[in-house]
Each structure stands twice: as C-alpha cells, then as structure tokens.
C-alpha cells in the first residue's frame, strides 16, 4: 500500500479564497482523522470519521472549516474563506480499530494564507 | 478522561549520549501506548507501541520504551544518540476497548543532538 496520500503538498493562497485539502486513506482502514499543526498550538485534532461518518468535529475551529468523506477512499477538508491564521500544516491519518488504534499519517499539506 | 504529559518540551543531548524522553499518562483502564517521531517537514511515523505484551518494547532506530504501570509512565530511551535522531517526538495513548478510535497525543518533545 502507498500509505496515506495527501494533496496538494503545498498550497499558497490569498486571504478570502477557498482552499480544499484532499486525503486518500490506507485501503481498508475504518477511521480517518484530520489534524492541524502550528508552532503555537502544536498538534490539534480537527475532526474524525468512522466508516465515512463524522464522529467528532469539536476540534473544527470555525464554521469556515468543513470536512467530508463521500466514500471510504477519499476525504476533503475545506476552508472558506481562508484567513492568514489558518496557515499551518494539515495532516490526515487513518487507522483500523482492531490494530490498537495505531494511526498512519500522511505527509501533510503546508498551507500558507497571505 | 485520558491525558498524556510529556515532561520537557525541549531536550538537548550530545551525540553518543543517552536519550531519555519522558511520558506519563492517565487512563481509567490499561492503555495502548505509542511513540511517534516527526522529522522536519515530514508526517508522524510510528517508533514503537505497547499493546500489553512485553512491558519493554523495542522500536526502530535503536529506540525502546518501558511500560511501568505503577508509575503510569512510558519513557522513551536510546543508549547512544545520533545526529539523525534530531526530531520531534510524540507520546500517545488509546484506551483498550475504546471504540472511539482516537489517540490522545502529548504536546511533543523536540530532541536536539549536539555534535
């Protein structure tokens, strides 16, 4: 398996623009997680899905953030409109419950909002 | 509620010296425990995990960790640091039998290795 795949790897956009981050989890995994990492706040869990259903979105910072998982092999995290304080590295991770909840992380998307 | 505390946000050692990164957890039931490493500009990757087999767990790159229930600790060690070990290290916990799928991560410890 190729592991968790994220795209794009880098995104530079201007304030007010819509940003869509994409994630392909490891085939067969039943959980998918979106994290944000910044120097100030560290690693934060934004939202996670189980079998494509959102379970906990309490970490989503504002209504400007939304996430979907239309099928088992694809998820998106959208920011609309984007703001400079959204600049961060966004990670997607997937896991299989029977594997002790071990999470497998993607390489991340580095987002810069100007 | 579960929590993880990593003592020391920054640790600096000399090349060849012992590495000790501390992790304490709180959990109402015996947990699964993990150490992840994040090299610069990369995602997190698993170093090792404790899943209730042997209490001394060996991982990649010469790292190991010991689960001590009485101390609620899972400290990470390596006998001799290498320059390539410079990275950020995260301890994480998951409760056995939990169906949330979540891991609770510590705040991370940045390891600096001096020549």
Image: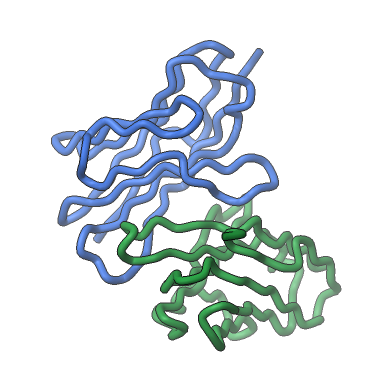
**Quadrant assignment, res A55:** bottom left
Q: Residue furthest bottom?
A: A70
Q: Position of residue A79 (x, y in %)?
A: 68, 79
**Residue sitting at x 62%, y 40%:** B39
**Quadrant assignment, res B21:** top left
Q: Is residue B99 left or right of residue B58?
A: left
Q: Position of residue A88 (x, y in %)?
A: 68, 60
**Residue sitting at x 45%, y 71%:** A28
Q: Which of A25 and A21 lies nearest the eye of the viewer?
A: A25
Q: Is residue B112 left or right of residue A99?
A: right
Chain identifier, green in the render: A
**Residue sitting at x 17%, y 51%:** B30
Q: Residue furthest front?
A: A1
Residue B62 versus residue A108 in the image, above or below: above
Q: How is the image coloured?
A: by chain
Residue B45 versus residue A26 in the image, above or below: above
Look at the image and give the colour of chain B.
Answer: blue
Q: How many marks?
A: 0
Q: Position of residue A20 (x, y in %)?
A: 72, 78
Residue A57 versus residue A108 in the image, above or below: below
Quadrant containing the N terminus of chain B is bottom left
Q: Position of residue B115 (x, y in %)?
A: 66, 13
Q: Which of B8 and B95 lies nearest the eye of the viewer?
A: B95
């Amino acid at each position: 398996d190729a592991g968790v795949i994220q795209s794009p790897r880098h995104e530079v956009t201007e304030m007010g623009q819509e940003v869509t981050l994409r994630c392909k989890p490891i085939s067969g995994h039943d959980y998918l997680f979106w994290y944000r990492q910044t120097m100030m706040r560290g690693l934060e869990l934004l939202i996670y899905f189980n079998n494509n259903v959102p379970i906990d979105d309490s970490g989503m910072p504002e209504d400007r953030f939304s996430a979907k998982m239309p099928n088992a092999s694809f998820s998106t995290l959208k920011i609309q409109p984007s703001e400079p304080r959204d600049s961060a590295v966004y990670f997607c991770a997937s896991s299989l419950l029977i594997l002790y909840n071990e999470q497998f992380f993607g390489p991340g998307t580095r987002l810069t909002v100007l | 509620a579960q929590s993880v505390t990593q003592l020391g946000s920054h640790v600096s050692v000399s090349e060849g010296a012992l590495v000790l990164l501390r992790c304490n957890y709180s959990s109402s039931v015996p947990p699964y425990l993990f150490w992840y490493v994040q090299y610069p500009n990369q995602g997190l990757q698993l170093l090792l995990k404790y899943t209730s087999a042997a209490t001394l767990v060996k991982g990649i790159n010469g790292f190991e960790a010991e689960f001590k229930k009485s101390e609620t600790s899972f400290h990470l060690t390596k006998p001799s640091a290498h320059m390539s070990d410079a990275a950020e290290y995260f301890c994480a916990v998951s409760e056995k039998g939990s169906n949330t799928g979540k891991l609770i991560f510590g705040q991370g410890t940045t390891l600096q290795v001096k020549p």
